[in-house]
Image: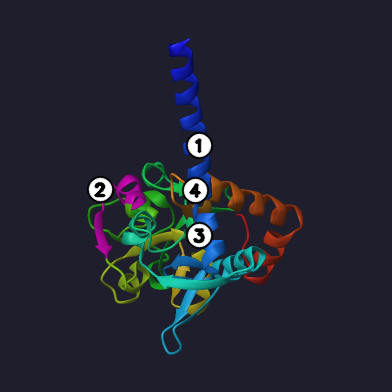
Amino acid sequence: MRRRSLVLAAAAFVALSGLAEAAESRLKRILDSGVLRVGTTGDWNPMTMRDPATNSYKGYDIDMLTELAADLGVKVEFVATDWKTLVQGIQADKYDITGSASLSPARAKVAGFSDPYFELATVPLTLKKNAGRFKDWADLDKPEVTVAATLGTVQEQQVKQFFPNAKHKIVEAPARDFQEVLAGRADAHITSNVEAATLVERYPEMMIVPVAAPRARTPIAMLLPQDDQVWINWVNHWIRLKRARGFFDELALKWRLRNE
């Protein structure tokens, strides 16, 4: 009888601990404070772009998270971060959620992900003057070729994976990999097909290498605290509802995003 009482008491303690954890969720804190803190890099066109003159942001992510905050009934506060510290910012409680990030097993070891809502693929870019030199992936994987990537991004790992024989130039934010190509310090760089489309529009001297097919199709999602399932569940319910009502389709159309 005594043993059964101890078991029941332990079970009750576990249940109460679960309730306490739920009560202390990031969701409750956000609702109580009236503010949703969003980590964003401001350097990924058209997802998140920061205007240094006004310190304001625009882009797909900005619209998405402004809508999420509105549905929560709170204000949104954008917190500047960079790719190499994006995950650490979630762990250190600098923000409650991030803008879009590529799913990766490494990130998922230490942070939570929302459900995906879009998919990207990786393509290489170079200068148009190199059109005869680079026509497919294999042309970039040579010792005399330098391929750039930005520190902390998924592309940093992909450069090493895709081009083991090439030289790798890894730059740290606020510098960007495409700037190395424009300046002639790298022959090419890789990025998402979404950013690639905006770069060739902005810089007419650049081109997407006409590879047979993009690589590494990857879903994108928002990063959240790994141990807060209540908050993760709410965000996932929001994504499912917004997807069903066409919000993400409208957002993709506005920012000219296509799953290619």
Count the numbered circles shown: 4
Disc 2 is placed on an element classified as: loop
Residue of label 2: 165
Labels 2 and 4 touching (C-beta < 8 A): no
Instruction: Tell me the residue at 41%/85% (across/down).
Output: 52
Dot placed on the residue nearer the N-terminal end, 4 or 1: 1
Dot placed on the residue nearer the N-terminal end, 3 or 4: 3
Dot placed on the residue nearer the N-terminal end, 2 or 3: 3
Dot placed on the residue nearer the N-terminal end, 3 or 1: 1
In the image, farthest residue toward the top: 1
Q: Is residue 47 above or below residue 160?
A: below
In the image, farthest residue toward the bottom: 53
Q: Is residue 66 left or right of residue 184?
A: right
> Marks 2 and 1, Cα distance to the nearest angstrom?
56 Å
Residue 159 counted in the magenta span: yes
Residue of label 3: 29
Residue of label 4: 113
Disc 1 is placed on an element classified as: helix
Residue of label 1: 16
> Marks 2 and 3, Cα distance to the nearest angstrom?
49 Å
Q: Nearer the viewer, residue 144 or 4?
A: 4
> Marks 3 and 1, Cα distance to the nearest angstrom?
19 Å
Disc 3 is placed on an element classified as: helix
Q: Is residue 80 left or right of residue 238?
A: left
Indicate the amino acid at tag 1: Leu
Given this view, does label 2 or label 1 mark the residue nearer the observer?
A: 1
Indicate which disc residue 177 carries.
none
Q: Nearer the viewer, residue 221 or 67?
A: 67
